[in-house]
C-alpha cells in the first residue's frame, strides 16, 4: 500500500524514475514538459538537452529525440534576451530547417551545442506523428520569429498552428504573434474567440483594441513614444519597448523617475550598458546595483 501511494500522480512517478535512472528518456520528457509548464525555462533547457543526448542511439526512429530538440530551442529562446539577436536568429533558422525537413538544424551557443538532421528518421517520424506536438512547435517557431522581426516566417507558422491545433490553451500566444506583426484583425479574432468573461482575456482584447488605434501614428512626440513603448510591453516585446524610447533618451532621463523608467526598460531588453548609464543619472552606484538585482529577479533574467 505504501509503495502504491508513492505514485499517486505522474509527477511522482517520473521523479522516481529519474532518481533511479537519470538517463530515462520518457522520464526526462515528462520532467521537461513539467518545467516548461511552470515557466522554469533554464531547468527545461537542461532537461531537454539531457533528453536529447539520452535518446541518441536507441534502435529505430526516436521522435521524442526530435521533440527534445524543439523543446531545447523553445527554452533557449525564452532565456535569451532581446539584445542577443544572433542567438535569436539562430533559433529561427533552427526551426525553419527543422520544420522544412531539409538540412541540419543546429543550435550553437556558449552553453548549447545541438544538431539534428531534419530529413532523418527521428524528425520525419516526429512530423508524421502527433499533430498536436508539431503544431505547438510551429507556434514556438512563430514566437521566436517575431523577436527577430521575421513576420514572413512567423505568420505562416502561427496560421498553420491555428489550423492544426484545436487546443485553445496557447491561443493567447498566437494572438500576441499577430499583434507583434501588426495583424490586428487576426490578433483580435483569436483573442475574442477565447472566454472573454475571464478578466485576463477581456484585458487582452481591450489592450489589442487600444494598441490598434495608435499603431499607425507617427511618433513625433515623447508622449507618442511612451504610448508605443507601453504597447510593445503589453505584447511582451521588451526589445521593441526599449527601441521606442531610444530617440527620446535624453529627454526621458532628465529627471530621476524618467531615468529609472528608461533603465528598467533597457535592462528588460538586455541592453545593459544603456541601463547602467541611465541609472548613473538618477541614483548612487550602490542603489543602482540593488535595483539591477531586483529587476533581474522580477524579469527572470541573469
Image: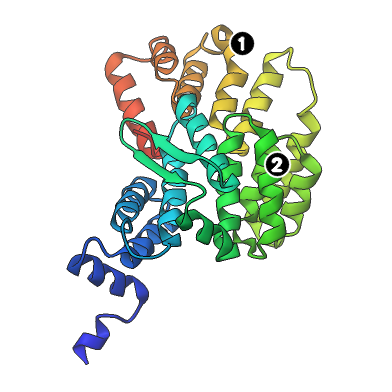
Which label's residue is closer to the chain start, 2 or 1?
Answer: 2
* Residue drawn at 20 percent across, 86 percent down: 3
Residue 48 at x, y = what percent?
Answer: 36, 52
Give the foreground label among 2 and 1.
Answer: 2
Residue 170 at x, y = what percent?
Answer: 60, 56
Q: Is residue 37 left or right of residue 182?
A: left
Q: Is residue 120 left or right of residue 158?
A: left
Quadrant of residue 211 in the image? top right
* Residue drawn at 63 percent across, 52 percent down: 172
Residue 297 at x, y = what percent?
Answer: 35, 38
Which quarter of the image is occupied by the N terminus? bottom left
- Marks 2/1: CA distance? 29 Å
Q: Which mark is residue 155?
A: 2
In this rendering, does residue 147 appear at all?
Answer: yes
Q: Is residue 63 left or right of residue 183?
A: left
* Residue drawn at 35 percent across, 26 percent down: 292
Residue 77 at x, y = what percent?
Answer: 46, 39
> Would you name the residue on which mark 1 appears?
247
Regarding mark 1 in the picture, which secondary structure is present there? helix
Local packing at callout 1 (Cα closer than 10 Å; few below 14, some 14-19, many 20+) is few
In this rendering, does residue 180 appear at all?
Answer: no
Regarding mark 2 in the picture, which secondary structure is present there? helix
Q: Which mark is residue 32?
A: none
Which quarter of the image is occupied by the C terminus? top left
Amino acid at each position: 500500500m505504501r509503495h502504491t501511494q508513492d505514485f499517486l500522480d505522474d509527477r511522482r512517478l517520473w521523479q522516481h524514475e529519474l532518481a533511479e535512472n537519470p538517463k530515462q528518456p520518457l522520464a526526462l520528457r515528462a520532467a521537461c514538459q513539467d518545467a516548461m509548464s511552470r515557466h522554469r525555462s533554464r531547468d527545461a533547457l537542461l532537461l531537454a538537452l539531457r533528453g536529447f543526448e539520452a535518446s541518441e542511439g536507441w534502435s529505430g526512429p526516436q521522435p521524442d529525440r526530435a521533440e527534445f530538440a524543439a523543446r531545447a530551442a523553445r527554452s533557449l529562446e525564452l532565456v535569451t534576451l532581446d539584445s542577443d539577436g544572433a542567438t535569436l536568429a539562430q533559433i529561427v533558422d533552427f526551426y525553419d530547417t527543422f520544420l522544412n525537413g531539409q538540412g541540419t538544424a543546429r543550435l550553437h551557443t556558449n552553453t548549447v551545442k545541438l544538431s539534428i538532421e531534419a530529413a532523418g528518421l527521428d524528425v520525419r517520424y516526429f512530423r508524421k506523428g502527433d499533430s498536436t506536438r508539431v503544431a505547438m512547435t510551429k507556434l514556438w517557431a512563430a514566437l521566436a520569429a517575431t523577436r527577430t522581426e521575421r513576420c514572413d516566417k512567423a505568420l505562416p507558422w502561427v496560421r498553420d498552428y491555428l489550423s492544426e491545433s484545436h487546443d485553445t490553451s496557447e491561443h493567447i500566444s498566437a494572438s500576441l504573434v499577430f499583434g507583434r506583426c501588426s495583424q490586428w484583425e487576426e490578433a483580435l479574432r483569436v483573442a475574442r474567440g477565447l472566454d472573454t468573461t475571464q478578466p485576463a482575456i477581456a484585458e487582452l482584447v481591450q489592450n489589442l483594441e487600444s494598441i490598434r488605434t495608435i499603431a499607425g501614428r507617427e511618433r513625433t512626440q515623447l508622449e507618442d513614444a511612451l504610448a508605443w513603448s507601453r504597447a510593445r510591453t503589453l505584447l511582451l516585446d521588451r526589445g521593441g519597448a526599449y527601441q521606442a524610447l531610444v530617440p527620446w533618451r535624453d529627454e526621458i532621463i532628465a529627471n530621476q523617475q524618467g531615468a529609472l523608467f528608461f533603465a528598467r526598460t533597457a535592462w528588460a531588453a538586455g541592453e545593459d550598458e544603456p541601463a547602467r548609464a541611465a541609472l548613473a543619472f538618477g541614483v548612487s552606484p550602490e542603489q543602482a546595483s540593488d535595483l539591477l538585482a531586483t529587476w533581474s529577479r522580477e524579469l527572470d533574467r541573469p
